[in-house]
Amino acid sequence: MTVYRSTSKYKLSKDQKNVIISLLGHVFENFESSIFTFVGAFTASYFFSHNADSWLNHYGAYIAISSGLFLAPFGAFIFSWIGDHFGRRPALIIAYLISIIPSIVIPLIPSYKQIGITASIALIIVRVFQGLGGSGAFAGRIVLVGESTSEKRNLNMGILISLGFFGALLGTGLSYVFITCEIVSWGWKIPYFIVSALGISVLLLRHHLTESIEWTNHQKNKPKKKEGLNIPLIQCLKNYPIAMFCVFCFGLCMLTPFYYTNIWIAKHIEGSKSTSLLYSTISMAVCGLFVVFFFWLVTFMKKETLLRISAFSFCISGIFFLVGLNVTIPEFHLINRLLIAFSTSIVIPPAILLSHELYPVNYRFTGFAIPFFLGQAVGNGPTPFYAEFIYRHTGSIYPTSALLFGSAFIIFTVSFITIKQKRYTNVSNDG
């Protein structure tokens, strides 16, 4: 009897495995973080005081949402140092270990009714650690995918970011189902249990990760002479201050309009909780679909040009928002969300790709992670808190739109600065 054996066995390359695992990890991270980031404003009553006169009643949810980025710059510093000294792989694995814990712990925290302010403090502490691990994991994935797939970098980056929005869509979508349908009183906890299982599954795949070829080749070819204490952050500040400023601005503004619209506006002036969560889910889908297109489009046009287009698009969205507050427009809130989602999908590709290109390989992890997450901690993360603070002190919604127009102005300005920095990086890349 003749036995036929397949000779067409297809094995994934190391780079392909890195990309696939990074994609799965990105789905998990965004699934996990979105559950509280975009839904927390509606479930915060479980963790915070119901007293109308309590400052925790007004600011508690926004502090908890922002706290996910309080220690993100510190996490970025730790994991970027590991990534630039010892490799992208160990940095990613350790970051994932830390980032899985919050999704397991948050649904286990007792309510404010049970333990009082201890519940609020416990939630904020857990969210802080979520940001600590998440910053290292996100930066590690961006760097690893960019270095592993130089020929298809734009496509793979686009898929990576798109799947991140898909993960966020799962988080908000499942929360929408379990909260609005009120299957059980603790239904808001179910997405956390699901994402915990996903996170553990992704972690089990970590042993398939390998170092990027670009980083490995750099380690082999770099001079072996001792140069004293080499701290990547100091070298970046010394040699690439403009690049760090640009990446800081990207972290500061890239998602600020999206957070402003889908968190603060969603809770403050829109209709029912179920409608708001549904709109957030649709916004995630729009962003996820269009971001792949713009990652493809940026291959054929200058990244700086796309940054300027995104700034213009944000301004148009802001004008529509201000007009809609005074004029009755059918489905105003949904259209406003879609405009912001579309504008966000334009700014992400050039911002991410430029952040990757502005540094040589030996300082890339540090140069991207630290300023980006410092910007996130200062601007993007606290956006709902800033909006609430402005509103409480002015008594008007209109001044809060400065967050949107300010982001557009900064993005537009930075688009001119990056041109000079790219030329400098290309000249000094051999140094």
Image: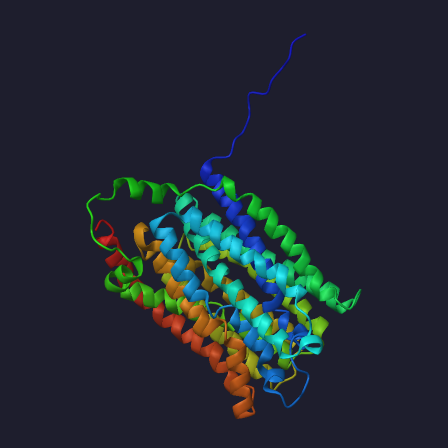
Where's residue 372, x and y in %?
41, 64
Residue 330 lies, in percent from the top left, at 68, 77
| Residue at the image point whose x is 27% and y is 64% from the top | 237
Q: Quadrant of the N terminus?
A: top right
Residue 278 in view in this figure: yes
Residue at the location (42% across, 58% down)?
352
* Left or right: 411 as drawn, with respect to 123: left
Residue positioned most to the top: 1
Q: Quadrant of residue 325?
A: bottom right
State which quadrant residue 32 falls in: bottom right
In depth, the one of 159 and 198 nearer the eye is 198
Q: In the rendering, at what x and y percent does residue 262 appear? A: 59, 72
Residue at the extreme right: 183
As drawn, 221 above or below 137: above
Q: Nearer the viewer, residue 72 or 382?
A: 72
Residue 34 drawn above or below residue 292? below
Q: Position of residue 142 (x, y in %)?
A: 44, 53
251 is higher (above) or lower (below) than 398: above
Residue at (45, 69) in percent of width and height? 376
Q: Could you tell me which residue is drawn at 34 percent across and 41 percent down?
A: 216
265 relative position to 223: left or right: right
Instruction: Say whether residue 311 is visible.
Output: no
